[in-house]
Amino acid sequence: MVPRFEYYPTRSVDEALTLLAEREGSEVVAGATNTLVDARARRKIPKAVIDINRLGDLRYARRDDGTIRLGARTTLTDCFSLPFFAEEAPVLEMMAAEFAGTLIRNRATLAGNIAYASPAADVVPPLLALGATIAVTSKARGSRALLLADFILGPRKTALAQDEIITELAFPADGETKSGYFKFALRNAMAISLVSGAVVLRMEGKRIREAGLALGAVAPKPYRVTQAEELLKGQAPTDALIREVARVAAATATPISDIRASAEYRREMTEVMTRRIIERALSS
Amino acid sequence: MYDLQTIHLKINGVEEEVSVKPYATLLDVLRDQMGHIEVKEGCAVGDCGACAVFLDGVPACSCLVLARQADRAEIVTAAGLGTPENLHPLQEAFMDYGGIQCGFCTPGLIISAKSLLDQNPHPTRQDVKVALSGNYCRCTGYEQVIEAVLAAAAKMDGRDG
Ligand SMILES: Cc1cc2nc3c(=O)[nH]c(=O)nc-3n(C[C@H](O)[C@H](O)[C@H](O)COP(=O)(O)OP(=O)(O)OC[C@H]3O[C@@H](n4cnc5c(N)ncnc54)[C@H](O)[C@@H]3O)c2cc1C
């Protein structure tokens, strides 16, 4: 049985914000793939859910000059099936292809994954590597934008206030990019990442102008590996440099040991997989 | 606060009304209140896929949808795809190829398979495996299921599903 809570459908962002501000203990629900699982397990039971899952105006993917803008309610299936992603953000398409299975992808949203702030949130490393910012809004204080890296504070902790909702994700689309993604888990589908990673290389000919490299599931929150990014910047990488970058990246990981894998194994796989995705990205 | 409220659903082509609690899942309402017991409750947390239905054309786990989120939606369950006299090619192929053993996962598998064939009428073996990766089957070992889907695809070639 799902425990009791109230339910409010909404027809606009404004209506959702008003309800969220008025109803104590309320939270928004989008795909409900985290919310209902947690409620049923009695891990977290909202007093009321404000449903934003039918707000068409939060589901879009477009390019404004040099910026890609994604509505908060963009689903994982959107990332996988809309040609827009293959063209403008292939790293998100690669990620979505390995996320859960079709039944979950069809409902799960990008914003829900970010707001839930699991250390193993698969949506986050690719967006970090893309240098994403996140827009949030509230009835009382209007909109604000912050770096995704600053938005996620730790396991299940974000900078989101109770009366705020995420409306948009944005990242620069400039120039030619090469990207790579990996999700390493105990099975190929429907599994929690042991480690995941994403790389986005903004190129200038054979040289890397800007590098984004982010890891997930090997620290309290997904993070950008700035030391490794610095090593790649301005370079036309050799095999030796790529190996060095992977080694540096793995050295920053602080994974846990649990029933699924030991910390040593996760760190080792971080190095192997990071090397492979950089190689793959550069040869694409 | 937790009052019943009427929602409207079109299930397998039939318009229906039902009064639901705010926290009731679509799965519970379909099974317990409306008698659609072809929709199975397995894990009830999205892992197993036994409760899959089409929700406005998109397959989803009905255990992870609140009934009120589905208000005015069109729902198709595995029982809505064919009748015992006139089976859907997928239903027929599951029987012919031993894709059904205990039968519990079958309605969910049929939904995911139908969704695949709607989008990709000529799937490879790998396409079938990927499309069914959110549906667990503890009997068949999946081989017979994959054979059934490929056979249905071949049979449906050239006509509408
Ligand atoms: C079987 C299964 C497999 C899964 N596999 C994966 C996987 O492979 N990788 C992975 O990372 N995750 C996985 N998940 C977790 C989950 O599906 C994702 O985190 C998903 O992206 C959550 O999105 P949602 O729309 O369903 O969120 P919801 O459950 O609707 O909401 C989750 C949280 O986010 C908040 N929220 C949602 N939208 C907004 C918004 N616009 N503004 C502010 N807050 C918001 C809600 O208040 C809630 O606290 C899986 C879950 C299940 C059940």
Image (cartoon, rainbow, N blue to C red):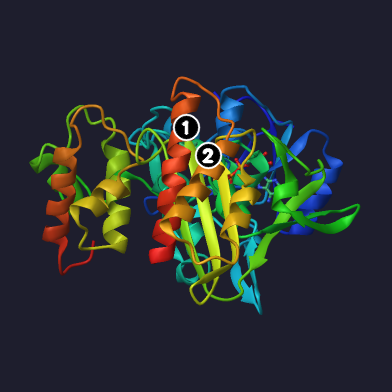
The residue located at (57%, 26%) in the rendering is: A40
Query: Along the horizontal axis of the image, is B157 left or right of B43?
Result: left
Name the outermost residue toward the bottom.
A65
Q: Can you see residue A127?
A: no
Say which quarter of the image contains residue A70. bottom right
Q: Can you see residue A280?
A: yes
The residue located at (54%, 61%) in the rendering is: A200
Q: Is A103 drawn above or below residue A85 in the view shown?
A: above
- Residue holding disc 1: A266
Could you tell me which secondary element the residue under label 2 belongs to? helix
- Between circles 1 and 2, the one closer to the viewer is 2
Say which quarter of the image contains residue A172. bottom right
Query: Along the horizontal axis of the image, is A32 left or right of B9?
Result: right
Q: Badge 2 sits on which subunit?
A: A
Pointer 1 and pointer 2 on the same chain: yes
Q: Position of residue B81 (x, y in %)?
A: 27, 51
Could you tell me which secondary element the residue under label 1 belongs to? helix
In the image shown, does B113 or B92 lie closer to the viewer? B113
The residue located at (27%, 50%) in the rendering is: B113
Q: Is B41 drawn above or below residue B90 in the view shown?
A: above
